Image (spheres, rainbow, N blue to C red):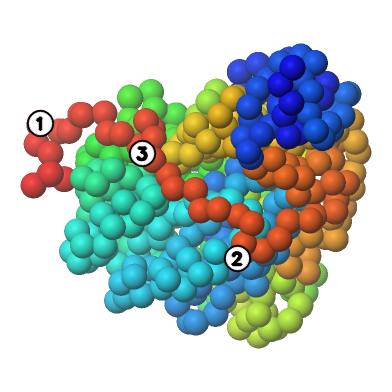
């Protein structure tokens, strides 16, 4: 009988396609066999538990450099700890580019930070200044280095790009083979309403939601898709906040356009009402797009079940509530336009998705795995190594107690941030062990991973990112 280094014995193995009881044999960091009565030097008993592929958080902001010289509080070290605590084994954070600067200007700095990661990671490349030198000179080098997804912001100072700049990036992505992820909100509409809110004497956090209603996101989503259709470049819409926006994606998908979408736990369990808490407390819930209204989450679940939205990422972007580097970086009295946007969610993503989705009967176990691991791996070119339980894949696994009831607290999140917007939320389903490339990195909440243990995972061009070959009037402007 083959002796494996480690065997996970007797668990209910769940992939995006199947659910079955089996042992998993692990050797040399990879899944070597799936079968019955496997024997290992180390045996981990998973009887009565689920065995899932480790989560892939394909949208999270980690140790991100900002143009003012500041760096996000969440380091790769603390992000890895938090991710492992929550059953996630791969992250895809963002390498920066700032206006009037090259990509190279910050690449080495960010790679050096990432090299200390305890968790495996791929990278997205933010593009904010798409000059010819950046698109034709630097981008092919970035892509050859294994970064095959670009992030574009249609709003947000100092990141936002014009429609013309967005088109140029879509065309370059098509030429060189990359997918494009888009933050869809209308910059001018938000600016206009924000100015009016401040003039009307409404500087408090609750105004955040008022400044950027659904239509602002819906318009930008429509525009992002229409321009991508013009270029015939696949795009992925980040952080869809409500069904009304998902409908734009569904309409385009029905036309055959290659557009995909994701949502995040904050849109499934938070509402805009949280931002109306007394004083500056509401800042803890400020993220963009804004959380919406009671009832909007059901629209998102419907879009998830229909396949319109097929990834649930965290958009983890942690800012502590206290201290001078987080939500109060512009002072305790900063108006809503000057409070950094973002909520932490690395550790909360899987438990909230499982609890709200599987435990409440909205999705199946297999859909849960697809949304949180398999589809992110496929979309961002990591599949074959990450995202499933099959021979040859990295042994990234999470042993999951489907019945465990937990009340979320900030200390359970194990991140660097001093608060969680999910404080007090009851969930059913919890990770009891996380295994990364064959090593136990979390057991019963104790994380043991070390700095530098994580590897950079180069991405390949996914099928989702390949153009379909349909351009208006048979004239492909991207290739001229
Ligand atoms: N929204 C983003 O798009 N990025 C970071 C934080 C946020 O709220
Ligand atoms: Zn965004
Ligand atoms: Zn984001």
Residue at 33 percent across and 57 percent down: it is 142
Q: Position of residue 399 (x, y in %)?
A: 79, 34
Q: Secondary structure at mark 1?
A: helix
Residue underneath mark 3: 461
Q: Secondary structure at mark 2?
A: loop
Task: Identify which residue, 39 or 445, lies in the foreground.
Answer: 39
Residue underneath mark 1: 474
Q: Earlier in the sequence, mark 1 or mark 2?
A: 2
Is the C-beta of the residue carrying label 2 under 8 Å from the nearest atom of ligand 3? no
* Image quarter in which the N terminus is found: top right
16, above or below 182, in the image: above
Q: Secondary structure at mark 3?
A: loop
Q: Tell whether 103 sits left or right of 400.
A: left
Residue underneath mark 2: 116
Determine contact: label 1, label 2, CB under 8 Å: no
Task: Identify which residue, 8 or 376, lies in the foreground.
Answer: 8
Q: Position of residue 73 (x, y in %)?
A: 65, 72
Q: Tell whether 136 sits left or right of 282.
A: left
């Amino acid at each position: 009988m083959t002796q494996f280094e480690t065997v996970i014995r007797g668990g209910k193995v769940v992939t995006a396609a199947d659910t079955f009881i089996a042992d998993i044999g692990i050797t040399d960091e990879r899944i070597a066999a799936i079968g019955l009565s496997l024997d290992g030097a180390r045996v981990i008993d998973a009887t009565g538990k689920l065995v899932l592929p480790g989560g892939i958080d394909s949208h999270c902001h980690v140790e991100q450099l900002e143009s003012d010289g500041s760096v996000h509080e969440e380091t790769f070290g603390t992000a890895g700890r938090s991710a492992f605590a929550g059953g996630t084994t791969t992250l895809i954070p963002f390498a920066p580019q700032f206006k009037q600067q090259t990509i190279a200007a910050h690449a080495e700095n960010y790679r050096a930070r990432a090299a200390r990661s305890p968790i495996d990671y791929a990278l997205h490349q933010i593009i904010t200044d798409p000059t010819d030198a950046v698109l034709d000179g630097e981008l092919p080098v970035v892509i050859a280095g294994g970064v095959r997804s670009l992030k574009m912001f249609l709003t947000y100072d100092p990141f936002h790009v014009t429609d013309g700049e967005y088109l140029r990036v879509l065309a370059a992505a098509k030429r060189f083979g990359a997918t494009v992820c888009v933050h869809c909100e209308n910059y001018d509409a938000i600016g206009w309403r924000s100015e009016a809110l401040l003039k009307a004497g409404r500087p408090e956090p609750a105004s955040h939601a008022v400044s950027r209603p659904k239509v602002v996101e819906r318009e930008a989503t429509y525009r992002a898709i229409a321009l991508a259709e013009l270029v015939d470049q696949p795009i992925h819409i980040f952080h869809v906040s409500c069904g009304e926006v998902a409908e734009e994606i569904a309409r385009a998908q029905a036309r055959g356009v290659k557009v995909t979408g994701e949502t995040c736990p904050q849109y499934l369990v938070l509402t805009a009402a949280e931002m109306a808490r007394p004083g500056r407390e509401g800042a803890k819930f400020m993220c963009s797009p804004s959380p919406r209204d009671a009832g909007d989450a059901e629209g998102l679940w419907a879009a998830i079940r229909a396949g319109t939205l097929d990834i649930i990422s965290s958009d983890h972007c942690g800012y502590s509530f206290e201290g001078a580097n987080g939500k109060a970086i512009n002072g305790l009295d900063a108006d809503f336009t000057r409070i950094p946007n973002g909520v932490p969610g690395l550790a909360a993503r899987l438990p909230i998705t499982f609890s709200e989705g599987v435990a409440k009967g909205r999705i199946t176990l297999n859909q849960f795995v697809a949304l949180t691991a398999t589809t992110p791996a496929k979309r961002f070119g990591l599949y074959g190594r990450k995202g499933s339980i099959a021979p040859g894949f990295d042994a990234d696994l999470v042993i999951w107690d489907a019945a465990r009831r937990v009340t979320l607290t900030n200390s359970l999140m194990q991140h660097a941030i001093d608060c969680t917007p999910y404080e007090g939320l009851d969930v059913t389903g919890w990770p009891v062990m996380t295994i990364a490339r064959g090593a136990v990195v979390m057991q019963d909440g104790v994380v043991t991973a070390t700095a530098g243990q994580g590897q950079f995972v180069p991405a390949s061009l996914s099928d989702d990112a390949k153009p379909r070959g349909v351009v208006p009037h048979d004239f492909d402007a991207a290739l001229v």
